[in-house]
Amino acid sequence: MVTLKDVGELAGVTATTASAALRGKDYVKPETTQRVRDAARKLGYKINLSGRSLRSGRSDTITFLTSGIEGDYFSQLAMCVAEEVHKRGSHMLIELSRYLTDDNDLSYTFSDGIIAINASRAVDILKRHPAVMLENYDTSLPTDTVNAPSDAGSRAAVQHLITRGCARIGIVGDNRDLNNPNIIPGSRDIRMRAAKETILAAGLPFDERRDFIKSSWSIDGGIEAGRGLAKKGKCKYDGLYCLNDGIALGILRGLAGDGVSVPGDGVSVPGDVRVIGFDGLSQGAYSVPTLTTVATDFKGMADTALTLLMRRIENLDDEFFPQTVNVGYKLIERESTAA
């Protein structure tokens, strides 16, 4: 059986260096890593994960826990996390929180740690393992958290509409009753509140009962809302901030669905109504018109989450205060808000 020692001898390094190179450790020079990998490939060496786990007490595996991976948002985020995990020489498992029960957390026992999003059912599991949560606004949970720039990004989105001359701005989305003290706000609630405050601070009219256009959190919901706004070829808003890109893409399609988004024929985008979304999903670059959006730094979320998680994994006996990090954003201006 080929051993690490054999690989190291062929590559001209020690077995320890060969092991570090094959695990992708960044302190090994790139040329050395390549030489070791070439030697391993030539000799047919396969890493014994079970043996390595027994020796190190670690599996070099991270679980990405999510409610689902449908849609561009979760797939894009999952890909960024997977790339970051791979860069650090580990592997990623995907687990769906909808299938959790109190006695089936075997995958987490095997993994070194968990990165979770929309996993409210897994709170007890997260407390038992090194974990980082994405998009968590429950400050009572003793976990590190990495959030999207929902507040700052929403203010930038509305300000962009105002700069473009919009004086009657509607907000499209879905949120919960923020006046209920028993409800913990989520990202959609924070986006709604920040947008509303920015509109009012600019001295523009906004009545939540009238100017918050309800839409389910989906493209289909946006289509329905867009069709409602475009009835009879009229729309009372000259600017629409959609709380996510899916809704915004639906709005564009809904306005066009009845043939009213053609210039000179009622409501047009951006001629009569300017539309901006949030998240920075790739689909927005191909819509008609292309979608202006506040792009979340998904790679930054993944990198920050892994950094916080590895700190806990590598120092299991140390106590850390929970950290909350809001990543950055970039406003990508496209046709839907063009001057």
Image (cartoon, rainbow, N blue to C red):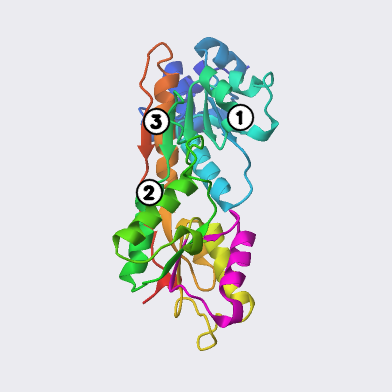
Estimate the x, y position of residue 173 in percent, counting from the top left. 53, 56
- Tell which tag, 3 or 1, sits nearer the viewer: 1
| Camera-side residue of 264 and 90 | 264
Q: Which mark is residue 151?
A: 2
Q: Residues within 10 Å of mark 2 (few under 14, many from 20)?
A: some
Asked if residue 288 can be seen in this view, the reply is yes
* CA distance separating discs 2 and 3: 23 Å
N-terminal label among 3 and 1: 1
Q: Magenta includes 164?
A: no
**In the rendered image, which quarter contains the C terminus?**
bottom left
| Residue in view at x 37 percent, y 33 percent | 324
Circle 3 is placed at which residue position? 307
| Residue in view at x 48 percent, y 56 percent | 243
Tag 2: residue type? Asp
Tag 1: residue type? Arg
Estimate the x, y position of residue 156 in percent, counting from the top left. 34, 58
**Local SS, label 3:** helix
Q: Which mark is residue 121?
A: 1
| Residue in view at x 35 percent, y 21 percent | 321
Dividing the picture into quarters, in which one does residue 61 lie? top right
Dividing the picture into quarters, in which one does residue 34 lie? top left
**In the rendered image, which quarter contains the N terminus?**
top right
**Local SS, label 1:** helix
Tag 3: residue type? Thr
Estimate the x, y position of residue 38 in percent, counting from the top left. 51, 33
* CA distance separating discs 3 and 1: 24 Å
Decide if residue 42 is on the left or right side of residue 270. right
N-terminal label among 2 and 1: 1
Residue range highlighted in magenta: 213-241
The correct choice, above or below, for 74 with respect to 10 in the image is below
Q: How many marks?
A: 3
